[in-house]
Image: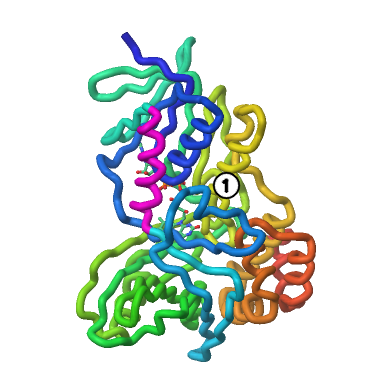
Amino acid sequence: MKQKYDIGIIGAGLSGLTLGNSLLSKKIKNFILFEKNTHLKNDKTYSFWSGPGLFDIKKSFSVKPKKEWSQIEIKVKNKSYKINLGNYRYGCYSSESILGELHKKITKEGVKVERGHSIKHFKKNHDGWEVKLKTKKILLKNVIDSRPNKIFDDKYPSLKQVFVGSEIISNQNIFNENVVTLMDFFESNKNVIFTYILPFSKNKALIETTFFSSEINFKQVEKIHNLTLKKFDIKEITRTEQAVLPMSPYIDRKMVEQYFRIGNFAGASRPASGYAFTRIALWANQIKTKKEFCYDMIHHKENYLTNWLDKIFLSVLRSNPKKAPEIFKVFFTKVPISSVIRFLSDQSRLVDYLVIILKLPKLVMLRGLINLYVK
Ligand SMILES: Cc1cc2nc3c(=O)[nH]c(=O)nc-3n(C[C@H](O)[C@H](O)[C@H](O)COP(=O)(O)OP(=O)(O)OC[C@H]3O[C@@H](n4cnc5c(N)ncnc54)[C@H](O)[C@@H]3O)c2cc1C
């Protein structure tokens, strides 16, 4: 006999597990998750902002940060600009601890997470979607798909974020453990390239080399990453992570008869930054706090103004990457940090949009805006 569920979630990653927990809070239990990995991996370092007036993700996910910082730094042409975060914090979390906590809550309620199944095909028949596992068939009324796309959207001004990261131990006490280097820019006419450093202690850090680029070229990223690592007198590399994330303002809202897409490739990822954690947390909370559950809530909704500003940002980055270091410098140093953080955390007030528009270099942004319509 076939097993039957109301909902099948493909992918027990951040969006799938978070949605699972939201469904439980609505007393929906007749669902199942399918995950290709056999066990949880510590393959991502999630970072997000916290502080006054922001949605309390730490409380909502019951997680403690691996480390939090109250100062960030932007480096342009080797000049450092340090910004105090006041009562705000930038914190990082291991994917293993976050996903482990979400997984535990779900399975405690008796929900099954079928691990070790890479779902490639599922077909629709008269009574629902049929998913074939090695030993059984499962029938689902609704499929919620969080698998990444193989093909990236290339429509102007979309970009890809390609990055390689190494957690290292240095032979020297080389890091200022109180300051996150958010962006240390490399000069480039073709791509936006920067180093991101999360210092865990004086001699331990995660160092990432990031490209905002229209192509995916890991060899090029690795070359610059290896050059960068040479600066840190490395004793040991303890962990690595890498990814290509979509930076696209065009959301794929594919919906074919009880089929929904969620996650990075369906609007969870912030177009101008590739960050998705806060969006996923806000989306899950909206589902939790609405009185009645309805399937329309499953889509990640876009905020028109945020998306429009991200489009202009991306247009500038794609058509004029050389200007990026200066624009990011102005953004972080001239706009009040509370407005920056609310904007980056999808929790802007009207005044935040106004101050960002007023402070950013007008001519460059105007060119970006025009390019949106002529390219
Ligand atoms: C290395 C890394 C670091 C990141 N850091 C940050 C950060 O600091 N801050 C931030 O806001 N965002 C960050 N992001 C972006 C974003 O928050 C994460 O990608 C987040 O995990 C997105 O959730 P998701 O559910 O879309 O994807 P995932 O969490 O990747 O979940 C998708 C799941 O689907 C599974 N899957 C894939 N194919 C199949 C298949 N065929 N069958 C079954 N299962 C399948 C995968 O194994 C995975 O578990 C980072 C992303 C990466 C990759």
Q: Where residue 228 appears, x then y in whole percent?
A: 34, 80
Q: Where residue 2 appears, x then y in whole percent?
A: 34, 12
Q: Residue furthest left?
A: 235
Residue drawn at (56%, 29%) of the image? 26
Is residue 220 visible in the rendered image? The answer is no
Q: Where residue 366 appears, x then y in whole percent?
A: 76, 71
Is residue 365 visible in the rendered image? The answer is yes
Let me know if residue 100 is in the magenta part: yes
Q: Which residue is mark 1?
A: 267
Which secondary structure is most common in the magenta stretch?
A: helix
Let me know if residue 298 is in the magenta part: no
The stretch of residues the image draws in magenta is 94-109
Residue drawn at (50%, 72%) of the image? 191
User: Does 173 appear above or below 355?
Assistant: below
Where disc 1 sits, the SS reads loop
User: Does 20 appear above or below 321?
Assistant: above
Q: Where residue 250 appears, x then y in whole percent?
A: 62, 49
Which of the pair 32/154 is nearer the observer? 32
Residue drawn at (39%, 71%) of the image? 208
Would you identify the image quadrant in which residue 330 lies? Answer: bottom right
Residue drawn at (63%, 77%) of the image? 327
Q: Hey, what amino acid is under mark 1?
A: Gly
User: Does 365 appear above or below 26?
Assistant: below
